[in-house]
Image: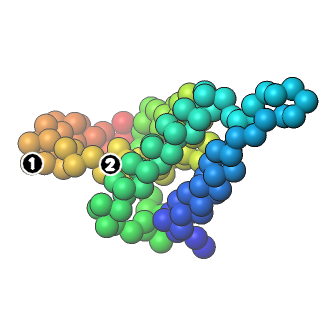
Amino acid sequence: MADYSQLMNLEKQQKKRALSSSGQQSTTPSTGQSTAPSIHQLIDQSIEQSINQSTSQSIRNHTDKVMEKPRGFYITERLNQRIDEAVRYYQEKHNLKKVDRSIVVTVLLENEANWTDEALDLLLDKIIHQLTRRLTNR
């Protein structure tokens, strides 16, 4: 089974091929019109490539390998819905068709600011509330 870094490398190779083939301008002899991609297509490709590169760099900078086996945990129905909405948002608004729940959750959890002592202390009341709910089955 391919890991995330292998999939990202394959995607980069495909994009490089697409960019190199789309970067070659030509004109149609009969009309003299350019067959090069539109400015909007080039901008969209550039933005998507930039996002993919920064995401890849962020993941590589942490030198954390993606876990072989999925790790499961319980989440609220509301959180489940929000994750689904985030995936849909990136797929529809930013045309990132390969975004899935795992990527969204990983990026959110890899935010270093969430893991400071101060940030964890701010969560204390919410953690106690969750523990209480689970112990009382509410």
Left/right placement of residue 101 relative to residue 66 reads: right
Quarter assignment of residue 35: top right
- Residue neighbourhood size for the residue with mark 2, other residues' Cα within 10 Å, grouped as few (<14), some (14–19), many (≥20): few
Give the quadrant of the N terminus: bottom right
The answer to whether the residues at label 2 and label 1 have Cβ atoms under 8 Å apart is: no
Residue sitting nearer the eye, 58 or 33: 33
User: Residue 108: x percent and y percent?
Assistant: 35, 44
Q: Is residue 132 visible?
A: no
**Location of residue 67 with respect to 15 vertically, above or below:** below
Give the Cα separation between the discs numbered 2 and 1. Answer: 15 Å
Q: Secondary structure at mark 2?
A: helix
Q: Position of residue 90 (x, y in %)?
A: 53, 35
Q: Is the residue 83 above or below the residue 55 in the image? A: above
Query: In which quarter of the view is residue 97 placed?
Result: top right
Q: The residue under label 2 is which amino acid type?
A: Leu
Q: Secondary structure at mark 1?
A: helix
Residue 51, above or below 33: below
Determine which of the numbered discs, if any, sits on residue 87 in the image. none
Q: How many marks?
A: 2
Q: How far from the left and from the top, in percent, is residue 32? A: 81, 28
Q: Residue at x 68, y 46 (%)?
A: 24
Q: Earlier in the sequence, mark 2 or mark 1?
A: 2
| Most foreground residue, 30 or 95 | 30
* Residue visible at 31% across and 67% down in the picture: 63
The residue wearing badge 1 is 117
- Residue drawn at (44%, 58%), measured in percent from left and top? 72
Q: Is residue 48 left or right of residue 63?
A: right
Residue type marked 1: Asp
Q: Residue furthest right?
A: 30
Tell me the residue that label 2 is attached to.
109
Q: Assess disc 1: are there few (<14), some (14-19) or many (≥20) residues with their C-alpha within 10 Å of its C-alpha.
A: few
Residue 107 at x, y = what percent? 38, 47
